Amino acid sequence: MLKMFTTQLTGLFSRNSSKNEFEYEVAARLLAQVLVGDGSVYVKGFGEMAAVELEATVGAEPWPNAKVLDDVDALTSVDRVLVVSRFAHNPAAMILAKKLVAANIPFVAIAEVERDRKDEEGLHTLADSFLYTGVGKPMLPKEDGTRMGFPSALAALYSYHQLFFVYMEFAEELFEEEED
């Protein structure tokens, strides 16, 4: 079971990287807009996705100028937001997304879209940039026919790190240009 899970995770990360390859750059550019203003990147993770909030703010390599989003009304036009949820139709995440859209605050979302809800309004339709986690159901079959192993937080952290790496490349390029 452990080897099967490891194999499934390896495949998940590979598919995630391929599916989101272009979008990582789009998302990083959007969040990097804070580098030319006085803005911050605010992070809001719903449920287990609070792991991304922690990684961004108090992890070993925190996101520069990252803050946990506690008050949408305190955001300004130079701020950007990263919204992370297990699914793109999480009711609380949708409320936040609609507030961000109404306030014209650009945001990136990380989540998965349930197969039967792709045509519905969700984070994937509201966000300025959307990254798929690739985890829509448990990964491993059990003997009784059910499944287990739903690593949505792992997948979100993987996406977060991919996004972080591209963002940091942009930041380094920007600061090199300023020094020249």
Image: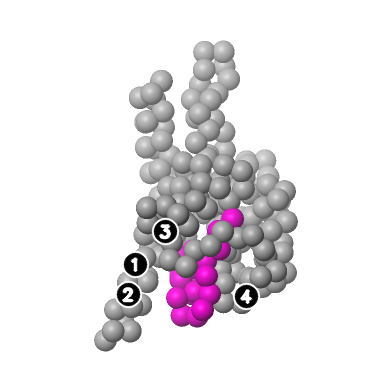
Task: Please state the horizontal and vertical placement of residue 149, each as a whole percent of the image.
Answer: 50, 29
Report which residue position mark 3 lands on.
62
Q: Earlier along the polypeptide chain: callout 4 or callout 1?
A: 4
Closer to us: mark 2 or mark 4? 4
71 vs 143, left or right, is: right
Name which residue type carries label 3. Answer: Pro
Q: Assign the C terminus to one quadrant of the image.
A: bottom left
Task: Please state the horizontal and vertical placement of residue 17, each as a whole percent of the image.
Answer: 40, 50
The magenta segment is: 25-44
Task: Please state the horizontal and vertical placement of residue 9, each as a whole percent of the image.
Answer: 41, 35
Query: At x 40% / y 43%, what residue is drawn?
Result: 13
Q: Residue 172 or 63: which is nearer the viewer?
A: 63
Report which residue position mark 1 lands on.
169
Name which residue type carries label 2. Answer: Glu
Q: Earlier along the polypeptide chain: callout 4 or callout 3?
A: 3
Residue 7 - label: none
State how far apart marks 2 and 3 are (Cα).
19 Å
Name which residue type carries label 4. Answer: Thr
Report which residue position mark 2 lands on.
173
Q: How many marks?
A: 4
The reply to whether discs 3 and 1 touch (Cβ–Cβ < 8 Å) is: no
Q: Residue 60 or 23: which is nearer the viewer?
A: 60
What is the residue that sits farthest to the top in this orientation?
A: 144
Task: Find numbered disc 3 in the image and state the secondary structure of the residue it sits on.
Answer: loop
Closer to us: mark 3 or mark 1? 3
State how far apart marks 1 and 2 are (Cα).
6 Å
Report which residue position mark 4 lands on.
76
Specify the quadrant of the image occupied by residue 7. top left
33 is within the stretch colored magenta = yes
